Image: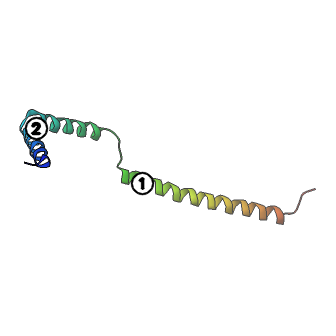
Amino acid sequence: MKAQSFFEEFQKGIQDLIAKSPAADIEKNVKAFMAQGFSRLDLVTREEFDVQVAMVEKLRQRITALEALLAERDQHENKTSPTED
């Protein structure tokens, strides 16, 4: 028996033993408990977060463009308005 084959069989035996032991039930219970706890929190997925980041970036670009447009109009109005003496 080769060493690699021995280790593979040993690993499979350990996995089978764990799957049949209370450890598997404990793992399932912990996962269920954590899922229940996370569901109570106001968490978002990474995908939802990335969508919001993209929307904020687009809004920031629009605001910057609008601010530049307003500044340009203010300059134009200041040049064309008569000065009061």
In the displayed structure, would residue 10 be above or below residue 84? above
Q: Residue at x 75, y 60 (%)?
A: 74
Give the residue at mark 1.
50
Instruction: Depth check: give the residue in front, 44 or 10.
Output: 10
Image quadrant assignment for residue 43: top left
What amino acid is labelled 2 in the image? Answer: Ile
In the rendered structure, the answer to whether residue 61 lies left or right of residue 41 reads: right
Give the residue number, with chain letter if any, for mark 2: 18
Which element type, helix, strand or loop, lies under badge 1? Answer: helix
The picture quadrant where one finds residue 22 is top left
Q: Residue at x 54, y 57 (%)?
A: 59
Amino acid marked by disc 1: Asp
Tell me the number on the disc at residue 11.
none
Mark 2 or mark 1, which has the lower sequence index? Answer: 2
x, y percent for residue 57: 52, 56
Which is nearer the eye, 73 or 24? 24
Q: Is residue 38 above or below residue 50?
A: above
Disc 1: CA contacts within 10 A as few (<14), some (14-19) or many (>=20): few
Q: CA distance from mark 2 to mark 1?
A: 38 Å
Percent x, y of residue 24: 12, 38
Coloring scheme used: rainbow
Mark 2 nearby-residue class (10 Å; few <14, some 14–19, many ≥20): few
Name the residue at 10% across, 49% down: 2
Percent position of residue 42, x then y: 35, 41
Is 3 left or right of 80, judged from the image as shown? left
Which quarter of the image is occupied by the C terminus? Answer: bottom right
Q: Quadrant of residue 16?
A: top left
Residue at x-position 50% and y-position 54%: 56
